[in-house]
Image: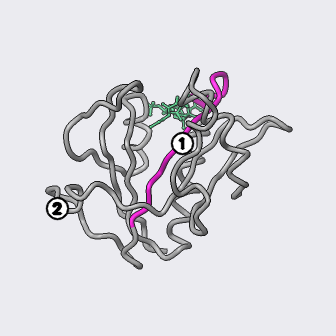
Amino acid sequence: MPVPVELVRPLRQQALRPGSPPEDSVFPGDDEALATHVAVRDGASVVAVGSLLPEAPPGWLTTWPGVRPPSGTGRWWRIRGMATADRWRNRGLGRAVLDLLLERAADAGGGALWCNARPAAVTLYRRAGFAEAGEIFEVPGIGPHRVMWRVVPEP
Ligand SMILES: CC(C)(COP(=O)(O)OP(=O)(O)OC[C@H]1O[C@@H](n2cnc3c(N)ncnc32)[C@H](O)[C@@H]1OP(=O)(O)O)[C@@H](O)C(=O)NCCC(=O)NCCS
C-alpha cells in the first residue's frame, strides 16, 4: 500500500546511506504526483521499503541492444530506494515490494522500468524479469552498480 515518503526515508538511510546525513535519503522526484512509496510494516516498525519514481533513464539505455520501447503511456519509471531491514532479509519482502511497485506502474498506464542495481540486488531484479544493460559502473562512495530494466507488463 502506498505510504508517505517520510515513512520510507529512515530505512533508506539506514540500509542505503549508513553514516550519511539524513538529506541523502531525499531523492529527486520523491514528491512528484506520480511517485509511489511502499512500506512493509511489522507493527509500528517499517521493515522493507521501495519507491517508484517517474524518471527518464540514461539516454544510452533506450538504444541498448535488446531494450524494447516502454508499453502503454511510453513512460519510464525508476525503481529506487529498495531496502529491507537486516533481520528481515531473505524472506521475500524485497520481491513483494518490487511486485507492488510493478503493479502500480501497470495501473498508472504502463511503460518501462529501470534501476541502478547493486551487485547484492541483481538476482532479485533478474527474478522479477529485469535484464542487465550497459557496463558495471561505480557510484562514488557507494560502490559498483549495473543498470537493469524491464517493460511493465500489460494489465
Ligand atoms: C537487496 C534487498 C533490498 C533485498 O531484500 P530482501 O527482502 O532480502 O529480498 P528477498 O527476500 O525478496 O530476496 C532476497 C533473496 O532471498 C531469497 N528468498 C526469498 N524468499 C525466501 C525465503 N522464504 N527463504 C529463503 N530465501 C528466500 C530470494 O531468492 C533472494 O535471493 P537472491 O538474492 O539470490 O535473489 C536487501 O538485501 C537490502 O536491503 N540490501 C541493502 C540495501 C541494498 O543493497 N538495496 C538494493 C539497492 S539496488
Q: Quadrant of residue 83?
A: top right
Q: Amino acid at mark 1?
A: Gly
Residue 114 higher or lower than 7, as above or below: below
Instruction: Identify the residue at image location x=42%, y=65%.
Output: 152
Residue at 53% x, 56% y is 52
Q: Reading the chain from its start, which is encountered first: label 2 or label 1?
A: 2
Pick the front one: 5 or 39: 5
Label 2: how many Cα within 10 Å (few below 14, some 14–19, many 20+):
few
Q: How many marks?
A: 2
Residue at label 1?
81
Pick the front one: 99 or 47: 47
For residue 18, side relative to residue 1 (left or right):
left
User: Which region is colored magenta?
Assistant: 76-91
Residue topped by disc 2: 63
In this rendering, is residue 15 above or below 41? above
Residue visible at 57% across and 68% down in the picture: 34
Colour basis: one colour
Residue 40: in magenta span: no
- In this picture, residue 32 sits left or right of residue 44: left
Q: Position of residue 145 (x, y in %)?
A: 33, 34
Ligand 1 near label 1 (Cβ, under 8 Å)? yes
